[in-house]
Image: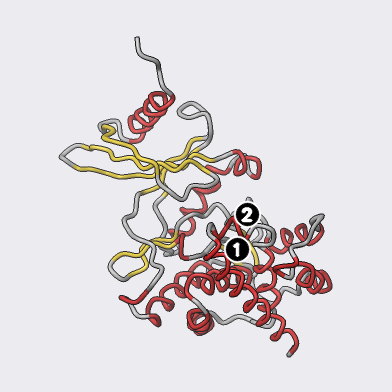
Amino acid sequence: MGKFMPEDHENLGFERLVGEMYPAGRLIRSWTLTGGVSAQVTALEIALPENEVKKVVVRRYGEADLAGDGQIAAHEFTLLQTVQAAGVPVPSPLFYDQSGRIFPKPFIVIEFVEGETILEPADIGREDFFGQFAASLTGIHRIKLETQDLPFLPDMTQEIAAKLARKPAQLDDSLQEGKIRAVLEKVWPLPQTNPLGLLHGDYWPGNILWREGRLAVVLDWEDARRGDPLADLANTRLEILWSYGAEALEIFTRRYKELMALDYTNLPYWDLCAALRPAGRIALWAGSPEKEKVMRERHAFFVAQAFESLSLL
């Protein structure tokens, strides 16, 4: 008698899931998707009646996600429904379960969207590419949140306050962490000059899929927050700089500002908040010495630009 392997148990779970979602359906195959760091991400191909084939994505949350939010599956399902209803291109939420009856850990099922990440927008044109990139982000930020809306979302300003209060034993001087913290500690919390909105929390090229020259979908909403849209803008500015360079940073920022009427006075402070994120882990994020060198150079440029802007206030 052969051994019952873990993958057999996993496939049984996927078959039960298919049976619950699509009683007349049949699991054709499953495969692991790359990019899942905090969760197990698996694609399923399902045969439906009348020769229809459907693909879905199953995201099973990891311990870090669950420690932060025990109801994360239900919350992400509700969030995706809200964002989709507002016209933002996101994968349709299809199903979720956090009872443990199908898999031991909570999970969500979303539609599988065909597309690709683009690290060189030569075929689209930089103005069009970064214009679409900016338009999608402003679409998210136009979703204004009242206190009672999506109450499970963490508050970005409070998270930054907690981060500033937790000073590490050893500061990352190579990224000017001490200098950045000193500036932010003097002004935090910033005065609220913009309406609170929905923040994606990790809006970067790796979470955007493109198809035939159009932005097709915005992925990975587990870092969503509520707060000043400038917080999201700042983080994306640094990611754009890292991925595409200084000219792209200028185009993206200009296109965003053309579309979004906000008070941008505090953007340099939010830029510094974004610049704190890689402190102590930029080598891990880079993955190679060559990429780390580029990221460090561009991070230094980003921080210098923020300090220069603050000197003019």
Q: Position of residue 157 (x, y in %)?
A: 72, 64
Badge 2, how many Cα within 10 Å: few under 14, some, many 20+? some
Q: Is residue 243 left or right of residue 56?
A: right
Q: Are marks 2 and 1 in contact (CB under 8 Å)?
A: yes
Which residue lies under the disc numbered 1?
A: 145
Q: Position of residue 192 (x, y in %)?
A: 72, 73
- Label located before the other in sequence (2 or 1): 1
Q: Position of residue 120 (x, y in %)?
A: 39, 72
Write the residue at 65% across / 82% down.
305
**Residue type, label 2:** Leu
Give the quarter of the figure containing the C terminus: bottom right
Give the quarter of the figure containing the N terminus: top left
Color scheme of the displayed model: secondary structure
Which residue lies under the disc numbered 2?
A: 153
Q: Which mark is residue 248?
A: none
Seen as rendered, the residue at the extreme right is: 186
Seen as rendered, the residue at the extreme top is: 1
